[in-house]
Amino acid sequence: MISLDFGAVLAEWPQLLRGAAFTLGLTAVSAVLGVGLGVACGWARAWGPAWLRAMVGVYVELIRNTPFIVQLFFIFFGLPSLGVKLNPEIASVIAMVVNLGAYAAEIARAGIEGTPRGQIEAARSLAMSEAQVFLRVVLPPALARVWPAMTSQIVIVMLGSAVCGQIAAQELSYFANLIQSRNFRAFESFIVATAIYLALSVLLRQTLNWLGPKWIFGRVPQSR
Amino acid sequence: MYRRTLLAALGAAALLTFGEARAQAALDEVMAKKLITIAIPTDFPPYGFVGTDLKPQGLDIDMANLIAAKLGVKVELVPVTSANRIPYLQTKKADLVISTLGKNPEREKVIDFTAAYSPFFQAVFAAKGVAIKGAADLAGKSVGVTRGAIEDMELSKIVPASVDVKRFEDNNATVSAFVSGQVQAIATGASVAGNMMARNPQLGTEFKFVLKDSPNFIGVAKGEDKLRLKVNEIIAAAKASGEIDKMAVKWLGRPAGELPN
């Protein structure tokens, strides 16, 4: 029978707190940049010129069909041979942005392509510029349509950031690992980390659910 | 598990009684046959590994050849693993075990040890241009280490707070981080560092300072005092002539230093 001793793990709460804060920060930066990149790529794939469509297509397929940890290792261990040395934190952000960007591109494209033609034609007949049509008429309802999927993807990327500890980025699972390597309370350490991840996920999902309608795309009446 | 321990104990007891009867005979047998059988590692660079010519090489192999040469006999090398090196000695499949064997009380109950012949240590390594003489010089630098390894524990005890200790999941990641320049120094075992330096000579990595020492000894079967003393003589002579140091520099990048007898 295993006897659990959470005290030994919880005594390290400053480290756990630091790790959780780092994970959140990493996710916040990556989510903003990643969704931005995703929307740009989504536009390119749906409306862009043929050469750009092809380029973005290669990027999306490349990222979506390789494991995140390989992308991370490529950036951290591979790029230095090309003379690009990044610290673990920057490497983690870049890997997460690139990864989220590819998935978000497909999600955004689905929203953009789901726009009824009539809406676009109506906007054009009002003499709006192409940029206005996209930014004001197409994008907000498109984002509103796919926001639940986008939220899920951001949560997945946050949970995926657990592997950034492998390149010594000091996020939550890095500290969970460090704690269990010191006091050999592996089970307790990972149970605590799991509970923190769960709490962070719920918090992040709620925040995004609130943030989307309020600040990003407004309360768009859904077309039926 | 219990049954296995019991079997092993019975086997060891049987061997011991058998060994008593033939005690002290090993050296005479070696000299009569003009052949010494030595157990060496092939999975533990730079102490023992298989080279590109498929022949074993490394510090332990050099040591085995040295002892055979000094005895004036031929040598037969038997590859062993960490788990079976002591049984090889107990069952007389080898006269000597030269296989990065550390001395501890449990092992001393079943085999005898000669004097130490090579250092094994955890240490800090970095490029030649980086001035590091002790833990204090690491201030403001980044050091890669494998999380939870002995060197991590030792390093964490002594480094100043301003050292950026980056902990990686395993030795491969730690070495990759150092080789790709992500950390300026690396704290690791002599074996890992030796292997890394051999494969990446362009980095100009050198030994900086020791974190923990745990020298290697040669194992002889229990009670084979004649062989043990003869090997001790050879080791003492090799220490005096500098051959032990030369070997350590060649394979580990550092002189052997003071080795316990």
Image: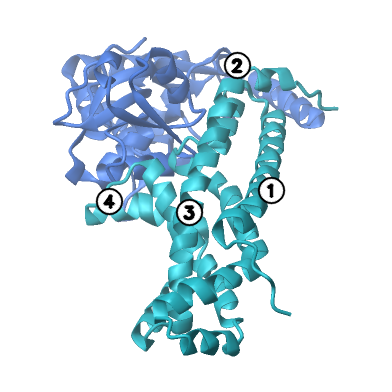
Viewer-side label of 1, 4? 1
Q: Look at label 4 and name its amino acid.
A: Pro
Viewer-side label of 2, 4? 4
Q: In x, y percent, where is residue A53?
A: 41, 82
Q: Which mark is residue B106?
A: 2
Residue lying at the far right of the rendered structure:
A1
Tell me what hue chain A is rendered in: cyan
Camera-side residue of A160 and B219:
A160
Q: Look at label 2 and name its amino acid.
A: Glu
- Left or right of A122 on screen, residue B63: left
Camera-side residue of A89 and B105:
A89
- The span from disc 1 to disc 3 (Cα, nearest Å) is 16 Å
The residue shown at (17%, 38%) is B204
Quick check: can you spot residue A99? Answer: no
Q: In the rendered structure, are the residues bearing label 2 and label 4 in contact, judged by CB atoms less than 8 Å apart?
A: no
Which chain is home to disc 3?
A: A
Q: In x, y percent, where is residue A60?
A: 47, 72
Q: Which mark is residue A206?
A: 1
Viewer-side label of 1, 2? 1
Q: Are marks 1 and 2 on the same chain?
A: no
Which chain is home to disc 4?
A: A
Q: Quadrant of residue B109?
A: top right
Tell me what hue chain B is rendered in: blue
